[in-house]
Image: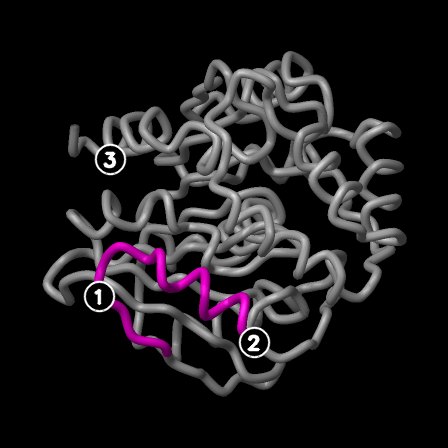
Amino acid sequence: MDSYSLMLEHWEVPFQERDLETSFGTTHVIESGDKQNPPLVLLHGGGGNSTMWFPNIAALTQHFKIYAVDIVGEMGKSDDTRLSYTTDDYPNWLGEVFHELSLSRSHLLGTSLGATLSIQFAIRTPEFIDQLVLVAPPSLEKMNTGFILRGLLSALFPTSSITKSFYRYITSPNSVQPPAWALEDQVVRSKAQRLNLNAIPVVTEEDLSKLPESTLLILGKDDRIYSIDAAVNKVKKAAPQVTIAVIENAGHVVTVEQPEIFAKTFFEFMNLA
């Protein structure tokens, strides 16, 4: 929690924190931006929390009212209730979050695990979604064995050197490097988190075909989680309605590695460039 607070010292815009009660546990939300702007819900990656949006929040709040949600069971301020990836638990949880935030519809932006949960939510409850943006969802293809083993090593032996080595592995060698304080927060989270052996299921082509017409998929060209070419071809075949952007000099953590290019791509899709 101390590390979470230190990360929020780098949140470049005013914010307030709220705790929402759901049947899946208390859910923590960071709110920023003008209430007159359209809503945008943010879902972070696995093992992380909403403070990961620190490189993006200033740009996003120029156009949106932001609700950055700590996913239950992950390393944030929400309850430590890990749900199943293969049931409707996560979509039902997010539906309750929308209800507690009084959101009948919203734009939705998810990265990594947050993107996978966003896919599940959009497929099951498309009536809640205005525009959907998915960044590096791990569920597009079967994950590479090397990626899984290195992630497991980092989880089992979360020393500073192993954690930072794993971050270098999942990011592009040519990307923008995060500040030292952000890497130290990752070390703290790695040491504190519970081991998660629940496999993320690969999304089917049938489910991809159900994605909303206004969907953007952003991938890092140097992401090692799976074959980017295979993922792109799968989405093009199953969901031709999806706009695809592959970002140069980015791996799996696109929003942190290339925040300016991410923002440009995002705003162009939203017709805000």
- Specify start and end residues of the magenta stretch as a single range: 1-17
User: Between 74 and 174, which is closer to the camera in this rendering?
Assistant: 174
User: Between 68 and 3, which is closer to the camera in this rendering?
Assistant: 3
Residue, x 24% and y 33% (percent of image)?
A: 267
| Residue 138: quarter of image | top right
Label 1 close to label 3 by CB (< 8 Å): no
- Image label count: 3
> Which numbered disc flags the more N-terminal residue, 3 or 2?
2
| Residue 144: quarter of image | top right
11 within the magenta span: yes
Q: Residues within 10 Å of mark 2 (few under 14, many from 20)?
A: many
Residue 14, numbered label: 1
Residue, x 37% and y 53% (percent of image)?
A: 129
* Circle 3 SS class: loop
Residue topped by disc 3:
270
Res. 141 in view: yes
260 within the magenta span: no
| C-alpha gap between disc 2 and disc 1 | 21 Å
| C-alpha gap between disc 1 and disc 3 | 23 Å
Residue 78, numbered label: 2
Type of the residue with mark 1? Pro
Mark in the foreground, 3 or 2: 2
User: Between 220 and 218, which is closer to the camera in this rendering?
Assistant: 220
Type of the residue with mark 2? Ser
Quarter of the picture containing the C terminus is: top left
